[in-house]
Image (cartoon, rainbow, N blue to C red):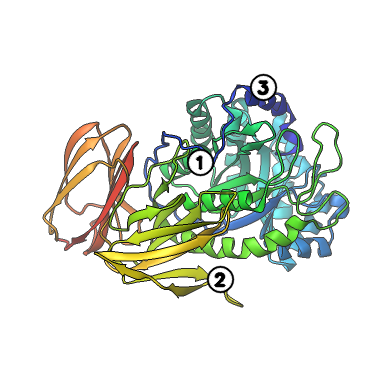
Amino acid sequence: MSRRASRLRAVWAALAAALLLVSADRMPRSGRVTAAIGSAAPADPRLPDFALFGWVSPPPESTTEARIAEYADAGFDVALPAWADSGRREDNLARFAWAAAHGVRCIAWDRRLNQVRFPDPLEALDSVVADCKNHPGFLAYYFEDEPVEKDFPLWARFQSALAERDSSHVSFNNLAGRQSFLTRDAWMDYTRNYVEVVKPAVLCNDHYDFTKTGDRGLFVENVAGLASIAREYGLPFWLIVQLIEHGNFRGLTEGELRWQLGMGLAYGARGLGLFTYWTPAPDPNWNWQYGLIDWAGRRTSWYSATQSLLPITRAIGLRLAAATWLATEHAGSVPLGGTAFAPDDWVRALDGRAALGSFASGAAERLLLVTNADSASERTLALTFGSVSRVSRLALASGNDGVWAPLGIAPTAGGARLDLTLAAGEFVLLRLEGEDGTLATGSAPVLHMGPVPARGQLSLTVQEVSRHGRLEILDSSGRRMWSRPLAAGATLRSWDGAREGGGRVTAGVDFVRVEDDRGVTAPRFAWLGH
């Protein structure tokens, strides 16, 4: 949220009264947001592989090199504007220089860009681009917070004009999240329309679920829906989560912060932001409590908490950014927008409440992001794997972004068991070694394929398809090579090795991935080529 979002605040207040206020992580719910494509967004060299940021930055009068160093030491590498940012050229250039010296890049708002709203708007872009384009501390041009749909054509015009002047940097809008809409469909239409009209390089929204009058229970629906639209259009997505107490939003525990970050990682977020880093000046309307830094510039307990939490968040985020999301499922309770856990060859049984994010990496590894779905209590989760010979956990070590530490597993009939004790909301990344087998979640469609191994042609029969069905061929690292929509009912398809965009797929071990609005199934198969 920013100072330019004030026109939405009255709407938020009205919507809050109309929304069903239930716990996001305690109430079992049904329902699901469909992921239309499911393959990873290609890496964009203009964006970091994984971004961590605290929104908002220190105000201009408090921005010094020491303050930027403090920001970086908290664990952040991307900076957004201040709450009441001046937008002045000299303030931005000073921030860029200090940021570059400490490994931070800035998403900057320049007040000269306000001229895009006037009849002859684009001359201002030339001077802004000249200042920003070649600066190592600059990342992206900040447009607006939570834009309304009537402004989408304006931002599309701006985006096009900006791309002509600076193809090396992107523009950035943070969208309104699920909390700002009465229905999921209205919110999804708003988000999809933004992508269609503006054609952004990254998709980002904020959703704050925890209020003083009850929790909304929409957090998973927001992140699952945002992720599905991002995959549909081949975009990375970022997510801004709640931290600070303000207005009707209550203060959080460390477990609730971890829970939000873990859910974002489980759905494949390429960036995570905390609202807020610097506490805005006292305001009787919002009654700001403290972020990581209070309004007088003093560190709070949140600062040390994030110093402990963000390094492992970054290490996991970087690993998952190099992998491809396949599915996310929820065991023990199913939040609104989530998919129920189903036993498969990856995880045959799970005793406890958890969210599981399944990923395939470029090394043909299986990666499993496990989040304790209880944000209030430590829990021990018992996972029984299928054909697994070794399980490792990503751990931090001095001077690197993580190392794989082997875990003790107990052999069981046809598999292996691992007991994980996780703090409230804690998340861990596991690497599974051994035979892949089939991944399945929810009430997935039934897939029959043959012959396996296949040469020249693979026949595919998909049964029990519900709404929003899709069939894909993914390579060993999870990148999509071919896809087709599936109608409800039974579908017969064949694939002859054709690659979307032309050419043929070479021999290898690949995935078939089938998804509808009830679940996912994703077995591997051997393709022998032609």
Q: Is residue 391 left or right of residue 142?
A: left
Label 2 sits on a secondary structure element that is: loop
Q: Amino acid at mark 1?
A: Val
Q: Is residue 483 left or right of residue 128?
A: left
- Tag in front: 2 or 3: 3
Instruction: Determine the CA span between mark 2 and mark 3.
Output: 44 Å
Decide if residue 166 is in sight here.
Answer: no
Of 12 and 98, which appears nearest the observer? 12
Q: Amino acid at mark 3?
A: Ala
Residue 288: quarter of image: top right
Q: Position of residue 362 (x, y in %)?
A: 38, 65
| Residue at the image point whose x is 24% and y is 63% from the top | 509
Decide if residue 399 is in sight here.
Answer: yes
> First in sequence: mark 1 or mark 3?
3
Q: Position of residue 330 (x, y in %)?
A: 42, 46
Compared to residue 524, the image places residue 461 above or below, namely above
Of 192 and 395, which appears nearest the observer? 395
Instruction: Determine the CA span between mark 1 and mark 2.
Output: 28 Å
Q: Amino acid at mark 2?
A: Asp
Q: Which disc is residue 14 wearing? A: 3
Give the residue number, with chain letter if any, for mark 2: 401
- Tag in front: 1 or 2: 1
Label 1 sits on a secondary structure element that is: helix
> First in sequence: mark 2 or mark 3?
3
Give the residue number, with chain letter if any, for mark 1: 220
Q: How many residues crowd around disc 2 within 10 Å: few (fewer than 14), some, or many (20 or more)?
A: some
Quarter of the rendering occupied by the N terminus:
top right
Instruction: Determine the CA span between mark 1 and mark 3.
Output: 22 Å
Q: How many residues crowd around disc 3 within 10 Å: few (fewer than 14), some, or many (20 or more)?
A: few
Label 3 sits on a secondary structure element that is: helix
